[in-house]
Amino acid sequence: MKNKRNVFLVGPMGAGKTTIGKQLADILKLEFIDSDQELERRTGAPIDWIFDLEGEEGFREREQKIIEELTSEQGIILATGGGAVIRSENRLHLAGRGVVIYLEASINQQVERTRRDKRRPLLQNDDPESTLVGLMDERDPLYREIADYVVATNDNTVKAVANQIAELVQQN
């Protein structure tokens, strides 16, 4: 990339932010960071444990600090957690410090990709599909608010989506 701009991936659980982000980082020759993985690395604790101990509010506080710091770096691909857009501070940092790509995924795709994952605290209930629908109703407008581009992930391979994003950000 010409001027080492950042690319921030937002979207729901199961949209492929981490997987696509790694591929995109390879294509653009930039560093890849996953904000959830970075939070786990720094705290030495998994996200679900942080949720259990501190609740969602405690987790969101930690997440906000990480996002504020990471968005200040240059030349990174950052995959955010699905709920990172809830806080207005995060939306400001993401929108103001890089190109924001909303990876759009259908509810069916999200259900399929997350159904066996026991480390997603918001989905540990009797009806994860209804939870995903509720989260999408709440978060979709926030993703769109800050997105420079919306890229559908449903019918494409990881490589195809990463190449599409690379083309978009290199035109920028």
Image (cartoon, grey):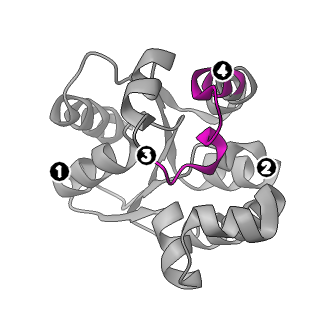
Q: Are marks 4 and 3 in contact (CB under 8 Å)?
A: no
Q: CA distance from mark 1 to mark 3?
A: 28 Å
**Dot 2, how many residues are within 10 Å of its Cα: few (below 14), some (14-19), or many (20+)?**
some
Which residue does the numbered mark 2 point to in the structure image? 87
Q: Earlier in the sequence, mark 2 or mark 1?
A: 1
x 56%, y 50%: residue: 81
- Mark 3 residue type: Asp
Q: Are marks 1 and 4 in contact (CB under 8 Å)?
A: no
151 within the magenta span: no
Q: How many marks?
A: 4
* Crowd band around label 3 with a 10 angstrom C-alpha radius: few (<14), some (14–19), many (20+): few
Going by the numbered disc 1, the residue's amino acid type is Ile
The answer, for residue 73, to whether it is visible in the render is no
Marks 2 and 3, how far apart in space? 25 Å
Circle 1 crowding by C-alpha within 10 Å: few under 14, some 14–19, many from 20: some
Q: Nearer the viewer, mark 1 or mark 4?
A: 4
First reached walking from the N terminus: tag 1 or tag 4: 1
Q: Nearer the viewer, residue 165 or 10?
A: 10
Residue 87, x across and y down, in percent: 79, 49
The image quadrant that residue 29 belongs to is: bottom left
Q: Quadrant of the C terminus?
A: top left
- Expressed as whole percent of the image width and height from the top left, the position of residue 48 reads 60, 61
Gap in angstroms between the C-alphas marked 1 and 4: 36 Å
Residue 146 image offset from top left, x and y in percent = 64, 35
Q: Which residue is mark 3?
A: 117
Residue that label 1 marks: 27
**Tag 2 and tag 1, C-beta contact below 8 Å:** no
Instruction: Identify the mark nearer the N-term, 4 or 3.
Output: 3
| Residue receiving disc 4 | 130
Disc on the earlier residue, 1 or 3: 1
